[in-house]
Amino acid sequence: MTVTPQTLTRHELVGLDVRVVAASNPDVIDLDGRVVSETTRTLGIEHEGGVSLVPKDCATFEWTLPSGELIETAGETLIARPARRTEQKGDSKWE
């Protein structure tokens, strides 16, 4: 399945380019880089200064899809164990 704005929340986020466009912590606003890790509640974003962990629930992210398209998502829509969030079958609320 190709990464599209409609399917982003079902895909692996590690490896995608991202920018924090809004957050409760002003220090991470405009942080941009590549996602190098993901947990249930955080994204690890690698940037020039190292890796920063950004909480999903209090941030809005702008993603650069492989096609070059930009899409914005509220972090709370990404809160789930990564393996569970990307499930294609079963009782996942992400189906």
Image (spheres, grey):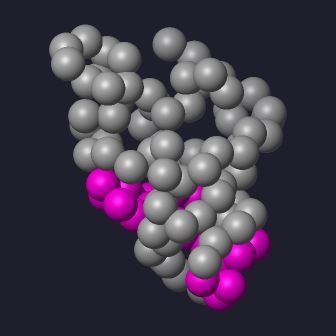
Residue at 80% across / 33% down in the picture? 69
Residue 17 visible in image = no
* Vertical comparison of 3 with 57: above or below: above
**Residue 47 sits in quarter:** bottom right
* Position of residue 10 in the picture relative to residue 74 (left or right): left
The number of numbered badges drawn on the structure is 0
Q: Position of residue 1 (x, y in %)?
A: 50, 13
Q: Nearer the viewer, residue 77 or 8?
A: 77
Q: Position of residue 28 (x, y in %)?
A: 63, 79
**Residue 83 sits in quarter:** top left
Q: Nearer the viewer, residue 75 or 51?
A: 75
Q: Position of residue 6 (x, y in %)?
A: 62, 22
Is 52 within the magenta? no
Residue at 71% across / 51% down in the picture? 62
Name of the residue lying farthest toward the left: 90
Residue 26 visible in image = yes
| Quarter of the figure that contains the C terminus | top left
Segment tinted magenta in the rendering: 25-47
* Vertical comparison of 15 with 27: above or below: above
Residue at 64% across / 72% down in the picture? 23
Q: Position of residue 5 (x, y in %)?
A: 67, 27
**Residue 60 sits in quarter:** bottom right
* Position of residue 84 in the picture relative to residue 58 (left or right): left
